[in-house]
Amino acid sequence: MKTEIAVFGGGCFWCTEAVFQRLKGVRSVISGYAGGTAKNPTYEEVCADTTNHAEVVKIEFDPEIISYQELLTVFWSVHNPTTLNRQGNDTGRQYRSIILYTSQKQKELAESSIQKIEKSNVFDQPVVTEVKHLADFYPAEPHHQKYYDRYSFEPYCQLIIAPKLEKLKEKFASILK
């Protein structure tokens, strides 16, 4: 079985992780940090904006079951790519919309999808999503992994993540596990 890696940041990694874990063909999802300059950043350093990293998820997927294009489609639909350094009440550079590509093909698909979104006028503001090469990925601390699965009863999970998962069920039922 051949797998590929996709790395996306669309706000809080707890939200993004919960979404991508539920897709057919996704083998693993790891919350972490990427897109910055510091080596081995901690959550506190990322939140203090001293590292320039974003909260991201590293998705290992089987391209025979789910394509990178399908992952992009889900990515665009579960966050707002037009708000700079913000998703809902989560504000700061670590919450920026970012695609970190691992191949030239991923870069081309990401850029093409942005152009299609811009032309479609789905959003009334321009897309501010960064597209850059993945240099390094640092897994987040263990207590951040599989957060929704462990704490779905917590208020943040109920108010922020659960509605994203409902939207996912409505729009993407055919590719859910």
Image (cartoon, rainbow, N blue to C red):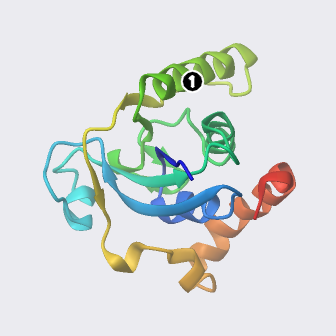
Q: Is residue 136 visible?
A: yes
Q: Nearer the viewer, residue 20 or 42?
A: 20
Find residue 74 and report its horizontal and vertical position in percent: 68, 44
User: For the point 30% across and 73% down, which residue is it?
Assistant: 141
Q: Residue at x 60, y 50 (%)?
A: 62
Question: Total marks drawn?
Answer: 1
- Could you tell me the amino acid type at mark 1? Leu
Q: Give x and y (percent) for residue 29.
A: 50, 61
Q: With 174 as the anchor, is 22 left or right in this view?
A: left
The residue tagged 1 is 109
Residue 177: x percent and y percent? 75, 65
Front residue of 102 and 88: 102
Picture residue at 63% right of the left edge, 66% below the top: 161
Q: Could one spot residue 126 in this view of the protein? A: no
Q: Nearer the viewer, residue 21 or 169?
A: 21
The quarter of the picture where residue 121 lies is top right
Residue 105 versus residue 141 in the image, above or below = above
| Above or below, 169 relative to 126 | below
x 41%, y 42%: residue: 85
Q: Secondary structure at mark 1?
A: helix
